[in-house]
Every structure is written in structure tokens, then in C-alpha cells.
Image (spheres, coloured by chain):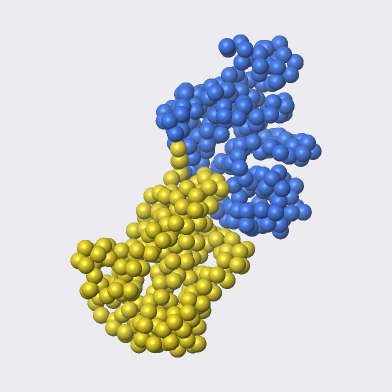
Amino acid sequence: MRTTAVAVRVLQQLRRDPRTLVLIIGVPCLLETLLKELFRGGPVFQHAGAPMLGLFPFVTMFVVTSITMLRERVTGTLERLMTMPLSKLELLAGYGVAFGVVAAVQATVVSVVAFGLLDLHVAGPRAVVVLLAVANAVLGSALGLLGSAFAQTEFQAVQFMPALVLPQFLLSGLFVARDSMPTWLRWVSDAMPLTYAYDALAHTAADVFDARFTADVAVVCGCILLALALGAATLRRRTP
Amino acid sequence: MTAIRVEALRVVRGGTVVLPELSCDVATGRVTGLLGPSGSGKSTLLRSIVGVQHVTAGAVTVLGEPAGSKDLRSRVGYMTQAPSVYRDLTVRENLRFFARILGRESEAVTRAIADVSLESHTDHVVSRLSGGEQARVSLAAALLGSPELLVLDEPTVGLDPVLRRDLWSLFHDLAERGVTLLVSSHVMDEADRCDALILLREGRVLADGTPAELRTRTGATSLDDAFLALIEAEA
């Protein structure tokens, strides 16, 4: 009930900012189109198109969530909520639900564009790509909530994107196959949640639903719970 | 009856001692003014009472419970100094959200909007409102849960005299219904509107009592002069 109240409120705030909504939906569509044109719809586009579709929501929701939560901390609304009968978990879950909904819309629109207009092909079911995209969005939200605890200004929060998200992208296996990475980089890659998110998408694109796919999904879900738990720990009712 | 008891409260913020060892009582069903210049520790004391301030030592008891206990979260209303509402939502959306968190019906929203005279701005986005109007939205959010104790940090700053008078009469109406109010202000002319006063200076209680008592004790005619006399007597 209170979780729903938080989710509805976050969505109302987003609705007041139509330009952000257009950017959230429009930018990934534009980038998918760019990717297709750049590689003339060839194998590179077919290889990277589906993982990109599934990983966009992660990036978007990371940034949007960390800024929204930072504002909540800075403007005193978090302090007010902390004096009210709302548990930290209800608050975080509310955020997760709201951004999960936005991600579902984002992933659905982008997949309609990519599969329908841009002739992107995946061997596995498209619905699984969309579902993985939503899971990745919730993961992005959870990490964004955690990240916001370490930022004092919006500038800092925005810089966390290249600092925390770009390395994960580079090491996920999308750009260089993990087998051909230097050993130490593969270890780093092993420790990053996005590696598993990418791998699950790559498996879906190839229609290979083996034990590794199950493990990937389990790791992503585990990381969501871990990030939410750590995020909850950074929310303090009493502050200095 | 004592609504709030603060005993030997010590608060250190960022290496600075804000409240060295503060003790005071707030009586039930009255409007108590917490007065003092800015930087005297008013907000820190109020934050300690609502349980969001990290305290170093001492005890704060609110409505018979330790400050910040779970049970108090639906019994205490708190208004922060800066308007703590969502600037990108309308007045009604803000209050409806806080009402749902408090488990209140939409009648509570309508009543709170009327209490702070914002009926004509119900569907306005908060960021488009003036500073005083934003402060009143924030106050309305504190009123929503019909709390037994209202802790208000400078609720009347920047309001025009008519509104200030209306709000003070609202505070006294609430007190008559049994609500305890602790209201901070740095404006001494608001002191006369309170039933009881706590004068704070540099993290210490300079004096407390009713406005009449403080005048008699110092022989001053205005509370501003009384405050000065108390500072000089201490020096």
C-alpha cells in the first residue's frame, strides 16, 4: 500500500517532466537506428542490437534513480519521510516498482522499433529480451539508489554513470569476448553484475537456455537484492 | 503534563558542539515557542525531538517514548525549516502522497489545505508557488496525520502579517483540542503569541517560562528587551 503510494508519486513526478520521458524512450530508439545505419544492418548490428536493447534501461534508470533519490535527500523530503510510518524497504521497493514500469514501457517501445522497423533478429523469444531489460532496469535503479548515498551534488551523481557504468559495459563481453580478455580483466569482469546481464541477453539472442543462462538470471536477481539491502543500509533515520 | 522531556542532550555536528548539555520540558496542550537567533541550535533540538538527529549523549522523551521510536512516527508531525515537499508535484498530489503514507483519507487532505488557506492553489505545481505558499504546503503535510505533537521549524518565516495571524490562531485552536505545539522562530515579536517560551542561545537554554514571567523577571516591557537583559545578566 505504502509501496504503491511511493511508486505512484515517483511516476507522477516523471509525468511532470515530459522532456525527460521523451529522452528516456527516444534516445535508445535513436541509438539503435544509428547502430543499424553505421553497420548497414550487418552482423555487428545483429550481434550488439539485442544486448544494447536490454542494457539501455540499466543505464537510464541508474541515472534517473540516483538523481531522484539525491533530490529526495537534499530537499528534506527524505527527512520528513523518515519521521513518518514508512519503512526503508517500502520506500526502496516503491522506487523499484516505479522505474520497473518505466523500463517496461521503454523496452517495449525500443523492441518494437528494433524488431519491427530495424529488422533486428534474435533466435530466442523477444519477450524474454524485454523481461531481461526490465530486470536490468531494476538493477540499475537499485545501484543508482546506492550510488546516490555517495553523491552530495547532482554533478557528482551524473559522474557516477561513466565511473561505474561504462567500465561494466566495456568488460561485459559485448565489445571484446571475455575469453580473449587478459586474465585479470576477466576477473574484474566476473565481479560485475552487467557481465551477467549481458550474458543472459546474448544467450537469449542465440536461443540457448542452458544452466549458464539460469545462473546469469540468478546473479542479476541476487545483485538487485544485494544493492537494495546496501541501499537500505545507507538510508539512515538519524543523520549527523 | 509533560509532552517532551529533554535531559542533558549533547549534539556534535561535524566536530562542532551544537548543544553542549541541554535540558528542557515542553508542556502538553500548549503552544511553546523555541526562540533564539539563527545558529543557536533550534533546528538541531527540533531534529533531536523528532528523532532524525544523531545525538552524542543525553535522553529525549516524547509522549512517554524515547524520541524516534517507531510508535511515535504516526503521533508526531514535523515541518522542516526548508519546505520539504516535492516541487514538481501539485499541492494536492503532495498532500495525497503524504496522507497515503500516514494511512489517512482524502478528507484529511482537504482539511489540511483549508487549515493553511491554500484552497485556491490546490492544483498548482509547488515550484510555481511563492516561498510563503511553499512553506504552507509543507505545514499542511505536517498537519495531515492529526498528530498529538506538532514540531514546526520556523513555520511563519516570510509570511505576510495577515497569514501569520491566521496561522497563530490555527496553532492555538489545535492546542485547545489538546495538541502540543513546539514552534521555533528567530523573530522575537512572535514570542508574545506563545503560551510558553524557551529562549535558546549558543546551544544553551537562556531562560524559560511564560512571556509574562519573563517580563516580570527582567523588568522589561518588550520581550526583545527581556532577551537582551537575560544575555547581559549572564555575561
Tell me, yes or no, if residue B3 can be seen here.
no
Residue A213, percent from left and from top: 28, 76
Residue toward you, A172 or A218: A172
Residue B28 image-quadrant placement = top right
Point 60% across, 67% down: residue = A19
Residue farthest to the right? Answer: B162
Report the side of B192 relative to B54 (left or right). right
Q: Is residue B178 left or right of residue B15?
A: right
State the blue chain. Answer: B
- The residue under the point 58% across, 24% down is B200
Vertical order, A213 against B202 (above or below): below
Work out whether A59 lies above or below B72.
below
Image position, residue A92 (x, y; %): 45, 57
Residue B178: image quadrant is top right
* Residue beneath the point at 71% across and 29% down: B190
For the point 71% across and 44% down, the residue is B132
The one nearer the camera, A29 or A108, is A29
Where the C terminus of chain B falls, by quadrant?
A: top right
Query: Chain drawn yellow, letter?
Result: A
Where is B23 relative to A208, above or below? above
Q: Residue furthest left?
A: A183
Split into 4 quadrants, where in the image is the N terminus of chain B?
Answer: top right
Q: Position of residue B123 (x, y in %)?
A: 71, 58
Res. A63 in view: yes
Residue B24, x across and y down, in percent: 54, 24
Give the tally of numbered discs: 0
